[in-house]
Image (spheres, rainbow, N blue to C red):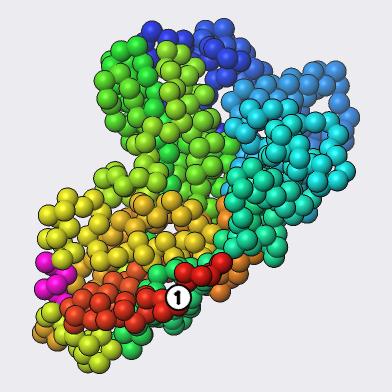
Amino acid sequence: MAVEVRRATPPRGGARPGEGRGARVQAGDALPLPIRHTNLIFSALFAASLAYLMRRWREKIRSSTPLHVVGLTEIFAICGLVASLIYLLSFFGIAFVQSVVSNSDDEDEDFLIASAQPKPAPAPCALLQSAGPAPEVMPEEDEEIVSQVVAGKIPSYVLETKLGDCRRAAGIRRESLRRITGREINGLPLDGFDYASILGQCCEMPVGYVQLPVGVVGPLLLDGRRLYVPMATTEGCLVASTNRGCKAIAESGGASSVVFRDGMSRAPVARFPTARRAAELMRFLENPDNFDTLSVVFSRSTRFGRLQGVKCALAGRNLYMRFTCSTGDAMGMNMISKGVQHVLDYLEEDFPDMDVVSISGNFCSDKKSAAVNWIEGRGKSVVCEAIIREDVVEKVLKTNVQSLVELNVIKNLAGSAVAGALGGFNAHASNIVSAIFIATGQDPAQNVESSQCITMLEAVNGGRDLHISVTMPSIEVGTVGGGTQLASQSACLDLLGVKGANRESPGSNARLLATVVAGAVLAGELSLISAQAAGHLVQSHMKYNRSRKDMSNSAAC
């Protein structure tokens, strides 16, 4: 069934809908006259054929005539019915059918549906192919390959593809690097890692891997669940401190959380000849009457992404369009980028004077601290809270409620305001976020916006107990895609019970992971603020974060 969409502002100075590349026409567009006539003819043919056949079949039933006995006029009617039906379906399209038969290659979505087909080796990154052409036949001996890589005759990035052995390729590249730089890298492990698992999706041209210790805090009693949270870090005292916060929360009855927004964003920027033309597109995109058409176009590229809304900003004749969509259990940057590209292709038919400068215009805003994420949210927006009993504050946290409330106001709220902080009204949320992100295969750079947090402390129950909450509007996590499928990171996700996609309730694993992040941040904030209120911070770090080893003569850690 076609969705009728009325345009808020008819496009001026451009092609009418239906004109341009391939004359692709969407539901609700104003159609050129010949196309409208053709549509009317086929619609009338469909209705007339169907009415005639129904009448004839009714007469046959009444006269006990077999339905399969047809005359010449009935054959013509059947042919007309089928032809008109095919035309009308091909013209207007059915978004559901297209979404089912579409062959999406989004790497985030590929992990949502298991496939028995072996994954072909990906082509080398296009950005690396300027190093020179690869030889048709590779030498058989490793020493000869190393010599040619050092001489620049064999590009380093083709080793995996040409050799068909990712471990061997990493070893040859590593030896070539040693000869080129003259530097030994013995402390960087080479063996013990599955290099095939990162090919074409996590890291290019590997020469080894970095070891990071993973600690576990818990149980974190959150929303009735007992969770043990993995944290990858090299900062002493961080795991111990967060674990103390978990203990205080558990002994007080646990914490609760709410995901109050869930949507990833991508904001392309387009330039127009005039600001007036940019404003015309802005009015079209923000008109609710046009949302259904944009949603249908967006969904053609994805099985799981669903457009939620579009908000625009103007800067002269440049238009920034911030699309937001749900992404299931994937973090979803690739998913939404594909959908947005489809929408841009559709809009270019109505606005041929639109010059798309970039698929990302920084109004998203990805991997940067930005007010738009703090206000509008990005990824999962979560609030997590707990009430800590007075006796727990005194026994476990070694301080008192009044001192905690006062310190939070002076430090986290007023102090951050004096510093001009943007979303940094907390003690050390990024510490916990980074550690969990690295352990569970998230994009570490998205710690920037994911760590935006405001910590609130209040005295409740007559001033005896402590209410603590953290509000985090832009936690960007996923349980499929990216680094989540690597063995170590997958194991950490499995420990939390959120590994992979949730087939019964798509998106629930990623939302649960976001609440775990917020819950761990709550524990970390509670413990650190308590340590500072009691004056224990320096003593703790001197105990847990100072190495007593003499490393001056050591070759490696």
Residue at image location 53% in from the left, 15% down from the top:
18
User: Is there any visible trace of residue 206 in the rendered image?
Assistant: no
Residue at image location 36% in from the left, 52% down from the top:
448
Residue at image location 35% in from the left, 45% down from the top:
368
- Can you tell which quarter of the image residue 128 is in? top right
Residue 511: x and y, percent?
Answer: 45, 61
Residue 508: x and y, percent?
Answer: 50, 62
Badge 1 local density, few (<14 within 10 Å), some, or many (20+)?
few
**Range covered by the magenta-colored residues:** 404-410
Query: Is residue 401 shown left or right of residue 155?
Result: left
User: From what the image shows, is residue 273 above or below residue 385?
Assistant: above
User: From what the image shows, is residue 408 above or below residue 188?
Assistant: below
Amino acid, disc 1: Asp
> Which residue matches tag 1?
550
Residue 91: x and y, percent?
Answer: 62, 22
Question: Closer to the camera, 488 or 294?
Answer: 488
Question: Is 405 within the magenta?
Answer: yes
- Can you tell which quarter of the image residue 361 is in? top left
Q: Secondary structure under badge 1? A: loop
Q: What kind of secondary structure does the magenta stretch mostly adopt? A: helix
Question: Closer to the camera, 86 or 43?
Answer: 86
